[in-house]
Image: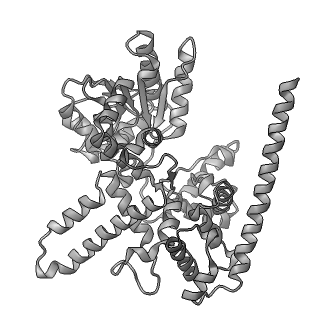
C-alpha cells in the first residue's frame, strides 16, 4: 500500500513502479492491469510510462473500472447471457428509458398524483447505490421479505417491498433494451467471475500484477472485483489516502483502505509525505482541519505518520474566516479582493481565484459580481456531454446509426419542437413494447384503436423524422460508396 498525501507525486510513483516491474523482467507489460477512476488519469498514466521506457508498450492495460468491465463483458458476457452489442446508458439515458416504461413499475407510494415521475430519478440513484454495494434485485427482495414488521411498521414494509419490486422491474427493462448502466457493468462482471470461474482464472493468468489508483474512492463492488482478480498470488499495489476521499456520496467506501491491512497482513507500506505543490502554511491548516475526522482515519488506526512537509519555501498566509451565510461570505470575499487591489494596483482581476465545493455554491458570488460590475469567468465542471443541445444531437446521431434505438428516439420525440404530450410518449413506448417494434417502427393505426392521442399531428411528426433519417442514411450510404471507390482508385496508383 502506497499512502500518498496530496501533492506528493502519486502519479509519478505509480508510473515508475510500472516501468520498474517491466524493466526488471518481473512481468511482461501485457501482464499489468492498472485501474483508475477517470479516462484522463488513465491516459496520463499511459503517456508517462511510455516516456519512461525505451520503447513503447502498446499492450499495457490501463483502464477505468467501468472501461475494464465493459471490455471483459464484451469478451465473455455471453457466458452469463449478455449480448456482445449491449448499450451502456448514461444517467440521463437510463432515466429516459425508465420514464418511457414508467407504467411497468406499478408504483404507488412513489407515484404522487400531481407529478407521477417526480421520484423516478431518486429511485434510479437508489438502485445505483445498491449496485455499488453489490446488491442484486433478488438480494434486496429476500432482505425485505425476511423483515418481520410490527403493526406500526406495515406501511414502511410495504414501501420497501415497492422499492424491491421497482428495482427488479428496472433490471428487467434494462435487459429487454439490451442495456447496462454503469453500476451494472461492475455488478455483471462480478457475477461472471463468480459463476464462471474459468473466465476468472483466464484473467488472473493474463494480469499477474494489479495496480489501483485512488484506492480510497473504491466502492464495495469495485474492491470485491480487485480482490477476486488479485488472488491467489496477491501481486497488488494500491495507492490512496483516506484523507482525500471525495466520492462517498456515490458509494465510495472509506472502509476499504482502513481494512486493507486486515485482509492483506503481509502488505508493505510506503508513506509519501513530501508535498511538491503547496506552502507549509496551507498544509498545516489542512492537517488541522482533517483531525476532525478522527478516529476514523488511517493515521489513528495504524499509527502511520502522514503529516506533510512542503518542499516549497515559506510564502503567503492562510486565514480562516467564518461567515453566517453564503451571501455574507460572498460580500466578505469581494471586500477582501477590493482591499487587496487597493494595496496593490498591479493586482488584476484575472490574478484572483475563488474555489467552491459545488457549482451551486458559486451562485451568490456570480450574482454579487453581476450586481457590482466585477468581471469574472465561471468555470463549472459540467461536462460538454450533459448539455441538452449536445445530448439532443447525440440522440439524432444514435438514431442515424441505429433507427431501433428507442431510448434516443424517445429523447428526440421529447424535444419541444414536436409539441409531444408526455402521456402520448408513454403510450407510444408501451405500444412499442407490445408490438415488439422500435418507436419509429410503430403501427400508429393500431395505437389509434387503443388510445385517443392528445398530440396534434403526431403522424406528421413521425413522418418528418423518418424523412430526415431516410435522407441522412442515403447521404451516409453515398459517402461510403465514394470512400470505397476512392480506396479502390488509390490502390491502382
Q: Position of residue 28 (x, y in %)?
A: 43, 16
Figure disc tally: 0
Locate residue 227, reporting x and y percent.
28, 35
Closer to the camera in the image, 293 or 205: 205
Q: Is residue 337 left or right of residue 124?
A: right
Q: Quadrant of the C terminus?
A: top right
Give whichever of 101, 303 is nearer the camera. 101
* Quarter in which the N terminus is drawn: top left
In the figure, 401 relative to 410: above or below?
Answer: above
Q: Residue lying furthest bottom in this view?
A: 452
Question: Is residue 191 shown left or right of residue 364?
Answer: left
- Position of 483 with respect to 274 (left or right) is right
Is any atom of residue 3 visible in this view?
Answer: no
In the image, farthest residue toward the top? 24
- Give me the residue at 85% from left, 28% from top: 490
The image quadrant of residue 261 is top left
What residue lies at 51% left-to-right and 33% top-to-bottom? 42
Amino acid at each position: 500500500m502506497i499512502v500518498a498525501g496530496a501533492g506528493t507525486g502519486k502519479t509519478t510513483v505509480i508510473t515508475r513502479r510500472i516501468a520498474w516491474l517491466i524493466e526488471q523482467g518481473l512481468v511482461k507489460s501485457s501482464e499489468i492491469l492498472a485501474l483508475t477512476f477517470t479516462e484522463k488519469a488513465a491516459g496520463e498514466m499511459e503517456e508517462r510510462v511510455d516516456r519512461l521506457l525505451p520503447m513503447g508498450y502498446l499492450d499495457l492495460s490501463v483502464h477505468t473500472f467501468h472501461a475494464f468491465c465493459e471490455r471483459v463483458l464484451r469478451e465473455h458476457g455471453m457466458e452469463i447471457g449478455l449480448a456482445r452489442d449491449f448499450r451502456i446508458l448514461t444517467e440521463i439515458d437510463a432515466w429516459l428509458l425508465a420514464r418511457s416504461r414508467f407504467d411497468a413499475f406499478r408504483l404507488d407510494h412513489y407515484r404522487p398524483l400531481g407529478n407521477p415521475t417526480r421520484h423516478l430519478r431518486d429511485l434510479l440513484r437508489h438502485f445505483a447505490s445498491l449496485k455499488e454495494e453489490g446488491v442484486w434485485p433478488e438480494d434486496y427482495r429476500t432482505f425485505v421479505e425476511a423483515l418481520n414488521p410490527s403493526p406500526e411498521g406495515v406501511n414502511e414494509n410495504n414501501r420497501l417491498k415497492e422499492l424491491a419490486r421497482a428495482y427488479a422491474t428496472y433490471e428487467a427493462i434494462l435487459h429487454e433494451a439490451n442495456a447496462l448502466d454503469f453500476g451494472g457493468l461492475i455488478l455483471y462482471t462480478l457475477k461472471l467471475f463468480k459463476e464462471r470461474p474459468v473466465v476468472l482464472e483466464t484473467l488472473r493468468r493474463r494480469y499477474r500484477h494489479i495496480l489501483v489508483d485512488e484506492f480510497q474512492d473504491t466502492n464495495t463492488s469495485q474492491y470485491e472485483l480487485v480482490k477476486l482478480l488479485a488472488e491467489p498470488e496477491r501481486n497488488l499495489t494500491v495507492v490512496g489516502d483516506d484523507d482525500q476521499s471525495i466520492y462517498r456520496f456515490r458509494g465510495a467506501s472509506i472502509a476499504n483502505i482502513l481494512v486493507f491491512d486486515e485482509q492483506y497482513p503481509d502488505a508493505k507500506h510506503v508513506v509519501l509525505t513530501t508535498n511538491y505543490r503547496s506552502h507549509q502554511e496551507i498544509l498545516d491548516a489542512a492537517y488541522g482541519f482533517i483531525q476532525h475526522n478522527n478516529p476514523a482515519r488511517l493515521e489513528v488506526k495504524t499509527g502511520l505518520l502522514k503529516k506533510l512537509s512542503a518542499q516549497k519555501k515559506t510564502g503567503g498566509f492562510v486565514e480562516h474566516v467564518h461567515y453566517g451565510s453564503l451571501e455574507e461570505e460572498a460580500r466578505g470575499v469581494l471586500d477582501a479582493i477590493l482591499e487587496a487591489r487597493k494595496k496593490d494596483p498591479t493586482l488584476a482581476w484575472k490574478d484572483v481565484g475563488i474555489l467552491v465545493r459545488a457549482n451551486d455554491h458559486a451562485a451568490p458570488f456570480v450574482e454579487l459580481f453581476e450586481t457590482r460590475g466585477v468581471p469574472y469567468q465561471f468555470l463549472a465542471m459540467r461536462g460538454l456531454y450533459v448539455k441538452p443541445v449536445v445530448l439532443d444531437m447525440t440522440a439524432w446521431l444514435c438514431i442515424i446509426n441505429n433507427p431501433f434505438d428507442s431510448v434516443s428516439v424517445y429523447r428526440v420525440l421529447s424535444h419541444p419542437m414536436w409539441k409531444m404530450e408526455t402521456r402520448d410518449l408513454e403510450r407510444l413506448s408501451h405500444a412499442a413494447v407490445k408490438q415488439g417494434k422500435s418507436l419509429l417502427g410503430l403501427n400508429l393505426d393500431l395505437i389509434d384503436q387503443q388510445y385517443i392521442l392528445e398530440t396534434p399531428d403526431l403522424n406528421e411528426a413521425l413522418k418528418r423524422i423518418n424523412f430526415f433519417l431516410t435522407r441522412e442514411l442515403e447521404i451516409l450510404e453515398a459517402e461510403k460508396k465514394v470512400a470505397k471507390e476512392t480506396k479502390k482508385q488509390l490502390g491502382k496508383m
